Image (spheres, grey):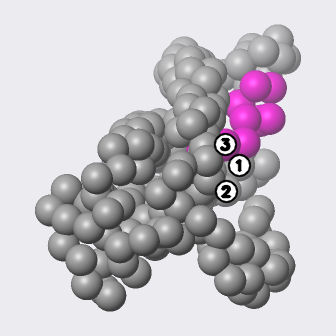
Amino acid sequence: MRWSGEIDANLASVETTKVELEQRVGVARGGIEILQVCEDTPETVAEVNSAVDIARATNAMRLRVTTLNELTTNPRLLAQQSDEERQRFADMAVYFELLPSESRAAEQRPQEQRIEDLEALTPGAPVSLSDVYDGREFTKVGFPLVLKSSVAEACRSEPLTRTLFNWCRWQSSLPPFAEQARGELEATKAMLASRRS
């Protein structure tokens, strides 16, 4: 059934997004904590640089809704549904209509003040970067963004700490939405499984 495939794809996407976000937010929070205590060692410089690198990009959560839209708008399909199914699909659709605007805000708001523009940072030496985007692996040459000076000097850069904080704040808003999406998907999957038995 196409609907089961869409649910499974969305569950996998939710899990991947949640795991990535937790890891990335943890790295950024570590950089903030170092800047707050002003500890200057080679390790702390590397950790702040990692946090800066993480904050150059944002995550978003995008879910497939083609089948859900058909189930909630097609009169022929609506006529074939029980009241319970119609209510479950409608509840899920309401949540999935809200998700894109919340996800867009979490993705775009941290980028309003570009970390690349901060005075405390400078491009580092070029490196070969491998990444995965939309399930496809690619390699490119990039320039990491690194501290211009020591952590002791960078910790006095309020814009750097504030930018990392802002990034964390917005990106941290997505995991609760991921959990809600998982709940909606699992409830729908359970209902469909009970219907088949």
Would residue 21 be seen by someone viewing this image from the given angle? Answer: yes
**How many neighbours does mark 1 have within 10 angstroms: few (below 14), some (14-19), or many (20 or more)?**
some
Q: Nearer the viewer, mark 3 or mark 2?
A: 3
Give the residue furthest to the left: 37
Q: Determine whether the residue tagged by mark 3 lies in a helix, strand or loop.
A: loop
* Residue for point 59% across, 65% down: 122
- For marks 3 and 1, the one nearer the N-term is 1
* Residue for point 42% across, 71% down: 149
| Magenta highlight on residue 161 | no
Image coordinates for residue 102, horizontal then vertical, percent: 54, 28
* Residue for point 78% across, 49% down: 2
| Camera-nearest residue between 51 and 59 | 51
In which quadrant of the rendered view does residue 142 lie?
bottom right
Would residue 22 be seen by someone viewing this image from the given angle? Answer: no
Q: Which residue is mark 1?
A: 6
Q: CA distance from mark 3 to mark 1?
A: 9 Å
**How many neighbours does mark 2 have within 10 angstroms: few (below 14), some (14-19), or many (20 or more)?**
few
Q: Which residue is mark 2?
A: 9
Q: Amino acid at mark 3?
A: Leu
Image coordinates for residue 83, horizontal then vertical, percent: 54, 15
Q: CA distance from mark 1 to mark 2?
A: 5 Å
Q: Which mark is residue 63?
A: 3
Q: Determine whether the residue tagged by mark 2 lies in a helix, strand or loop.
A: helix
* Horizontal side, residue 52 vs residue 27: left or right: right
Image coordinates for residue 16, horizontal then vertical, percent: 54, 63
Q: Which residues are magenta?
A: 61-70
Q: Amino acid at mark 2?
A: Ala
| Magenta highlight on residue 64 | yes
- For marks 3 and 2, the one nearer the N-term is 2
- Residue 50's place in the image compared with 187, above or below, is below
